[in-house]
Amino acid sequence: MRLILTWFINAAALFAVPYLMHSVSVSNVAAALVSALLLGLVNTLIRPLLILLTLPVTVLSLGLFIFIVNGFMFWLVAQLVDGFHVASFWAAIGGALLYSIISWALSTLLLKNSDANT
């Protein structure tokens, strides 16, 4: 049940990003749900490999290259899902950062309250 709630929270965060950043667009709720699911899968399967491959650059940049990797994951999902569009790669970096902040805030707010009620 918690996994489904996390998926809906991430979809809601993804659906909220275009209201704060005009270079990202999500056409409907179904596109947000599919994109959130695909973002979770890509971040679970591909991101660790990319982080390992880019470890020297990440160390040299004191960890800031992780923002580039996150932006690439966000941009990749936007290329794969119809109804989810990112204007440029730099917009994907900003969108990924905004998406992370919103999903963290929503999950902290909603999941912490659901843990207190159980």
Image (cartoon, rainbow, N blue to C red):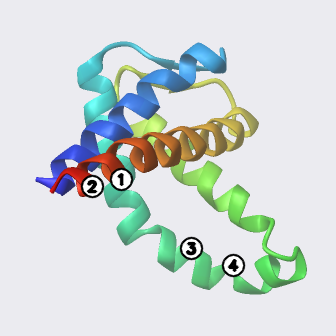
Tell me the element at label 2: helix
Could you tell me residue 31's position as x and y percent?
30, 25
Q: Nearer the viewer, mark 2 or mark 1?
A: 2
Query: What whole-number distance in Å separates the C-alpha atoms at marks 3 and 4?
Result: 6 Å
Q: Residue at x 49, y 68 (%)?
A: 47
Q: Identify the residue at the far front of this view.
A: 117
Q: What residue would you read off at disc 3? A: 50
From the viewer's side, name the closer residue of 99 and 69: 99
Query: Left or right: where does residue 85 sit relative to residue 97?
Result: left
Question: How far apart are labels 4 and 1 at the CA level?
Answer: 34 Å
Q: Are marks 2 and 4 in contact (CB under 8 Å)?
A: no
- Residue at 32% x, 50% y is 111
Q: Do the numbered discs 3 and 4 sit on residues whose CB atoms are within 8 Å?
A: yes
Q: Kindly report the distance in space between the C-alpha atoms of the residues bearing marks 3 and 2.
A: 37 Å
Residue 110 position in % (x across, y down) = 34, 42
Real-space Cα separation, disc 2 to disc 1, in angstroms: 6 Å
> Residue 112, which numbered label?
1
The earlier-in-sequence mark between 2 and 4 is 4
* In this rendering, the label closer to the viewer, 3 or 2: 2
Mark 3 / mark 2, whichever is N-terminal: 3
Q: From the image, tell me which residue sits under label 2.
A: 116
- The kind of secondary structure element at disc 3 is helix
Per the image, the residue denoted by label 4 is 54
Element at badge 4? loop
Q: Are marks 2 and 1 in contact (CB under 8 Å)?
A: yes
Q: How many marks?
A: 4
Q: Amino acid at mark 2?
A: Ala
Q: Which label sits on residue 71?
A: none
Marks 3 and 1, how far apart in space? 31 Å
10 Å crowding of disc 3: few (<14), some (14-19), many (20+): some
**Contact, CB < 8 Å: mark 3 with mark 2?**
no
